[in-house]
Amino acid sequence: MSQSNTQDTLVGLFVAAGIAGLFFLALQVSNLSSFTEQAGFTVTARFENSGGLKVKSLVSAAGVKVGQVSKITFDPKTFDSVVEMRIFSQYDNIPSDVSASIYTAGLLGEQYIGLGKGSSDEYLKQNSEIEFTNSAIILEKAISQFLFKSAEEKAEEKK
């Protein structure tokens, strides 16, 4: 009888450890690993097309994570995506004339915002707006433009 209880306890512990491991893995994959918001300041940027950018997407400068996307809204007056980013407080020396571009990690990877170099003596601060932006490149749109251009060139050659 005591061996059965010991065995049941071990199986229960093993199952609990497995569930905890799956929970940890799910948190890592979904970028929800930190439940507290890291100290920092909010800046915004406007994009013609934010593509597949999501809340909690990475914001990086020179390949280093400097923040994350905190909110994405639509401006009905300008038809732009307004992206709010939380920049971590230790990166309070990013020039105010920095550029923001939406990139894709790999061929089919997640989209993120990359900050380009700036040269201003003033730095981004709470509620700053990044003026120089490059929207996401939509793969389907780029392919269709390439195919249309190729077809157009072939039609001109036949003339």
Image (tube, grey):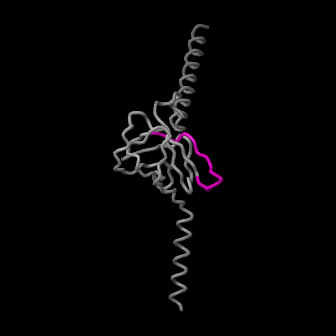
Q: Would you say the magenta stretch is mainly helix, strand or loop?
A: strand
User: Which region shows up in magenta?
Assistant: 67-80
Q: Residue furthest top?
A: 2
Q: Which residue is outermost to the front?
A: 122
User: Please, which residue is most extreme toward the right here?
Assistant: 76
> Quadrant location of the C terminus?
bottom right
Of the pair 153 and 4, the residue shown nearer to us: 153
Q: Is residue 147 above or below residue 90?
A: below
Q: Residue at x 61, y 46 (%)?
A: 73
* Residue closer to the observer: 101 or 109: 101
Query: Which quadrant of the rendered structure holds the N terminus?
Result: top right
Which residue is at the far bottom? 159
The spot of residue 107 in percent (x, y) is 48, 56
Q: Residue at x 52, y 38 (%)?
A: 29
Q: Which x, y percent locates residue 69?
A: 52, 42
Residue occupying the point 55% across, 27% down:
18
156 in magenta:
no
Residue 120 in the figure: left or right of residue 101:
left
Q: Name the one closer to the observer, 155 or 123.
A: 123
Measuring from the top left, give residue 99's x and y in whole percent: 43, 52
